Every structure is written in C-alpha cells, then in structure tokens.
Image (spheres, grey):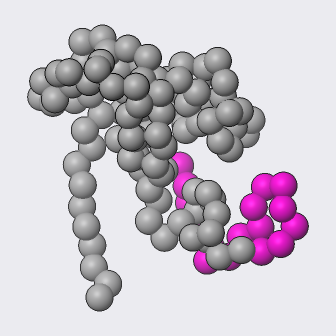
Amino acid sequence: MPGECAFSYIGTIRSPHKAVVGMPIQSPGAAGLVGRVEMRPDLVDGLKDLEGFSHVILIYHLHRAEGYSLEVVPFLDDASHGIFATRSPRRPNAIGISVVRLLSVQGSSFRFANPDMLDGAPR
C-alpha cells in the first residue's frame, strides 16, 4: 500500500529558534517565548473567528529533518525505542504536530505561546 500524498503549504511558522542546537524538545522548554504563523494571502479569510479559541493545532513539515531511523535513543534516555514511540523528528514522514495556546490574531498571522519548532517550518 505504499504511495504518496502531497499537501500545499498554507503558511509559515516563525519562531525564535533558528538552529536545532539549543532548541527546546518540548514546549515547556520554550516558556515565555512567542511564535507566529504567517498565512498565505489567499487563505487569510480562513482566520475569521479564530480569536475565539484558546488553542490551535499546528501540523507542519519538519523541514530540516534529514533521513529517518526506525529505532532511536531519545534525549534523556539510554534505551532504544521504535520511532513511533518517540517525539524524534527523524521520521519516515517528517510531519510535526503541536497544540499551542493562541495569543492573538493580527491580519494575516496569529501569535502563539511556547514555540518548540524551528523558524521557517512550512505549515
């Protein structure tokens, strides 16, 4: 059943994290920081009424992940685990998902709390 599935980017995630080194591995490590999603101009109308919500689900491309391993040793662990039992970005499909706290909606973008993803991640 192998196949391909293609998606079009609908925006870009902006975060203070420009490099993998030093980037938090979970959102509590980014406490106090703010991220932003810049939507494509043709999709801005889709942000209508978003400010009424407390959280947003971001699904994004782990655009800097290279290759994958089916078993990894996670950070702060000494045992190998299957990739699907971890948060490792080196996955067969480099897709990330984060539930983030919405801070504000401003024109063609929205701000969110505690970004734990790299700057420039396509969304």
**Main secondary-structure element of the magenta-colored stretch:** loop
**Is residue 20 in sight in this rendering?**
no
What span is colored magenta in the figure? 64-80
Q: Residue 34 at x, y = what percent?
A: 54, 19
**Residue for point 47% across, 27% down:** 101
120 to the left or right of 87: left
Q: Quadrant of the image for the C terminus?
A: top left
Q: Residue 97 at x, y = what percent?
A: 46, 49
51 to the left or right of 83: left
Query: Is 63 in the magenta?
Result: no
Query: Is 72 in the magenta?
Result: yes
**Residue for point 75% across, 61% down:** 74
**Is residue 4 in sight in this rendering?**
yes
Q: Residue 26 at x, y = what percent?
A: 65, 41
Q: Where 10 sits versus 109, above or below?
A: below
Q: Please state which of residues 121 and 112 is positioned toward the viewer in this rendering.
A: 112
